[in-house]
Image (tube, rainbow, N blue to C red):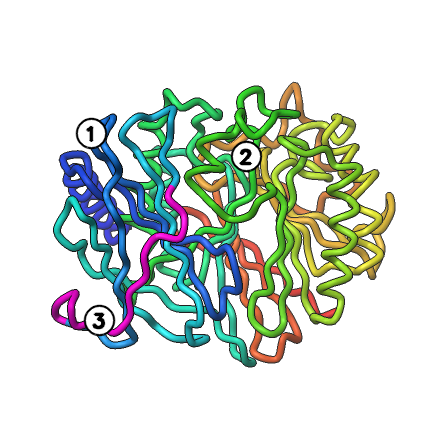
Amino acid sequence: MKLVSLILLLCQLTLGAHQARAGIRHTYLTWQADPSSSISINVQTLHQPGQPPPQITVVYDTVLAAAPSAYRWASAATNVDPIDALPGRTVHSVVLHDLLPGQRYHYRVLSSQDAASRVYHFRTIHDEPKPLRFIAGGDMGIDENAQRLQAVAAAQNPQFALIGGDLAYANGDWSQTRVWDRWFDIWDSLMVTPSGNQIPIVAAIGNHEVRGGYAGNVQDAGPYLRFLPQSPTPYYERSIGPHMGLIVLDSGHLTPHAGVQTDWLRRALEGHSDRPLCLVAYHVPLFPGFRLPSGAMPSAGREFWQPLFEQYNITAALEHHDHIFKRTVLIRGDEETEDGILYLGDGAFGRPTKPVEGPRQVHLGRRWYLHKLESRGHFWRVDVDAAGASATFTALDEEGIEFDQVTRLAR
């Protein structure tokens, strides 16, 4: 793939420029509100420890302007978060509201300590019947496999990226911030659409975001929670366009499956019950491709979440954690049925894949719920048709080969 190799070379050159730069360190997008009418522009800055952080303002417009002063609108950071564990680093979140749905915007970041940034671009999600495309994957890291997959993913022209946990592999450790820096540098360089739009991040929490992996507290996941402001809780929901609901869950890393989160899940599913499509994403699979399904986390997911998935007839569940390609049969209860739920996974968006067979693996033929299993790095491209009548899931590898596809009809 000569194109991918060229993109990776350009990425390396860009990373070198980032490393030498002070002031504005990273600029990336998340959502904290309606994706059709808002965007969260997150800006990490560096400054002298003990000194106040720079003031950050974003100027933006639907028309590309030659100078910052020519942009029609401006907004200051709505949240300024100095990181005590990283003296001299601050995360500024500039949330833009009242945006036009389906509109392309141009913006620049202005810092009181820097000249204006380069011009960035993003597009809001439409709120009328139009096709929707996004990519989904998890378990990334920062090595070349992850970069190749990101280059292929960005070439699909997605409207956002759903990352199901285990992003940078920094394990909730502030001393590994350089790993996060590398991850954000790669994202900034590669995860841009062919038309130049930044790709917003929608992320679930995984065990490699948390010290200890499971049953932690907010201090144990400080870098993930502070760098990626998305919600007051590690589980949240979004309405994506007129047809799709998206629910992101925490599979036991900070919040147990049972109790408060399951009660919230029931309300979230009910809230999206009038939408023809609803996807649920989380890190640890209920029906794993590599690890044994008898583990504590998969068992808890099947006990507390699976009945609700089936009650509300979700379109599909996006699972991760196992570093392998998986597609299940349609599952209801503990058997294959025509009206069952589809589970897709299992998080191989960069990390080395696990073997299909081995000491910790049960052969494909002995796992009744597996339709396909392969030791192959991949991500899923998800295409929702304009009418919301179906969602098509296509698996692509680092060479851009589409090697699996399945379509689910509206419920």
Q: Quadrant of residue 326?
A: top right
> Are the two marked residues, 3 and 2, in contact with CB atoms closer than 8 angstroms?
no
Q: Position of residue 30 (x, y in %)?
A: 44, 53
Where residue 250 sits in the image (x, y, percent)?
64, 39
Task: Indicate the secondary structure of the residue bearing disc 3.
Answer: loop
- Earlier in the chain: of badge 1 and badge 3, it is 1
**Residue nearest the observer in this picture, 297 or 24:** 24
Q: In the displayed structure, does residue 355 sit left or right of residue 178? A: right
The residue identified by callout 1 is: 48
Question: What is the number of the mark on residue 71?
Answer: 3
Residue at screen point 18% across, 54% down: 117
Write the residue at 40% across / 63% down. Answer: 96
Disc on the earlier residue, 2 or 1? 1
Residue 223 as seen in the image, left or right of residue 4: right
**Label 2 sits on residue:** 323
Q: Position of residue 121 (x, y in %)?
A: 29, 64
Q: Which kind of residue does numbered mark 1 sit on?
A: Gln
* Residue type highlighted by circle 3: Tyr
Q: Secondary structure at mark 1?
A: loop
> Image height check: is 240 above or below 12?
below
Sequence-first disc among 3 and 2: 3
Residue type, numbered disc 2: His
Q: CA distance from mark 2 to mark 1?
A: 40 Å
Q: Which residues are magenta?
A: 66-80
